[in-house]
Amino acid sequence: MVYVQGLGWADQSVGLIITLSGAVLLIVLSSSVDGQLCPTRPVQIFNFGDSNSDTGGLVSGLGFSVNPPNGRTFFGRSTGRLSDGRLVIDLLCQSLNVSLLSPYLDSLAGSIFSNGANFAVASSSTIPKRFPFSLSIQVMQFIHFKATTGSKHLINDEGFRKALYMIDIGQNDLSDSFTKNLSFVQVTERIPSVIEEIKSAVKALYDQGGRNFWIHNTGPLGCLPQKLSLVEKKDLDPYGCLLSYNAAARSFNEALLHLCNEMRSELKDAVIVYVDIYAIKYDLIANSTKYGFSMPLMACCGNGGLPYNFNAGRLCGRPGSHVCDEGSRFVSWDGIHYTEAANTIVASKILSTNYSTPRIPFDFFCCS
């Protein structure tokens, strides 16, 4: 184990990845993810999304078991996160020197929400609407939280107004469409409905006083070992990813960028930052060796061996699954979600502002 400034104790091979990725990334990690970005005012963060940012909502909300080896790298135990360690949302919180977000659905356990709450739940999507735990339901939960318990956790109206509202959702909408064997055209025809739900969510949060929004687009769906293992007829790009799945993700992202630009003009006093997660994650696949990853399309934890190590009947943490020794050599943790090593690089690139539109630093929301 080694100590990475601002990230805490991490697997020693994470340090290796930082070294292998070159001086530029090393500088970004040491200067941006240093836990010293919010010296003036703590910021409340409210997050909405799916398993990419679920810090325990699936477990607390549905009683679903997320077994070891999930959580082994950083926490040393399962915390409900679908990764071997920290998620991107965790690393972003630590960059601001604020506590990791507790899942809203864990409120019965007496969690403290003074720095915000996480409404994200694994498997969530935007449609169907009003279906647990769709984006619209998560926003309704926030409105209930604000009306009934916000003051209990020392968050006043000014705190809600200055809070940062993060949205990372859409991957499951696309995935579900492909799972239903819809054609590429049919999948893309559903995208406007997904975008409309995200727009409704932002406007609902705006009506509740929210003014700061941080919106992630969706990653390269066609590079997930899960998708690669389940699709029989594979149309692959030069890096081994599914062309049609990634094309659908890019179409979604183009529509989401257009929405953010549109809302920026419409909601004059709001700050809306769009972050290109797709570009960041695809770079990890395309240039995997630069970052120290040896098998970017193979899951560390799963079943089946080469080339993808994914078996839907023997998921990570379930009987019959196996886990690799060095998660830091893998991009994918379980075939769907990323390892902490990969998440660390994703977070550092987010903090660089090179993938943000407009290029507003993440600490803007606590130092402005």
Image (tube, rainbow, N blue to C red):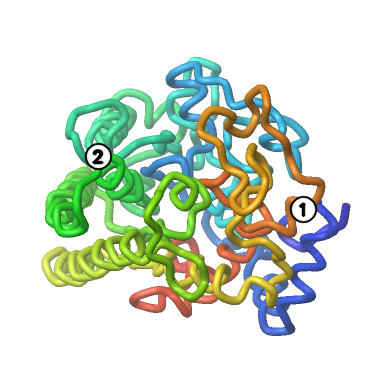
Of discs 2 and 1, which sits in the foreground? 2
Which residue occupies 58% across, 48% down?
A: 87
75 in relation to 300, above or below:
above
**Is residue 50 among what the camera can see?**
yes
Q: Front-most of 68 and 165?
A: 68
Whether residue 206 can be seen here: no
Query: In the image, what residue occupies the spot 34% across and 44% down?
Result: 172
283 shown above or below 183:
below
- Occupied quadrant, residue 37: bottom right
The CA span between labels 2 and 1 is 42 Å
Residue that badge 1 annotates: 8
- Residue 116, position as x, y percentages in the image: 46, 40
Please give the residue where the numbered disc 2 appears in the rendered image.
180
Q: Position of residue 358 (x, y in %)?
A: 34, 77
Q: Could you say whether the residue bearing mark 1 is in a helix, strand or loop? A: strand
Return the disc, 2 or 1, that comes first in the chain's sequence: 1
Q: Residue at x 69, y 65 (%)?
A: 34
Q: Amino acid at mark 2?
A: Lys
Q: Secondary structure at mark 2?
A: loop
Q: Is residue 136 or residue 162 the one in the foreground?
A: 136
Residue for point 72% across, 56% down: 7
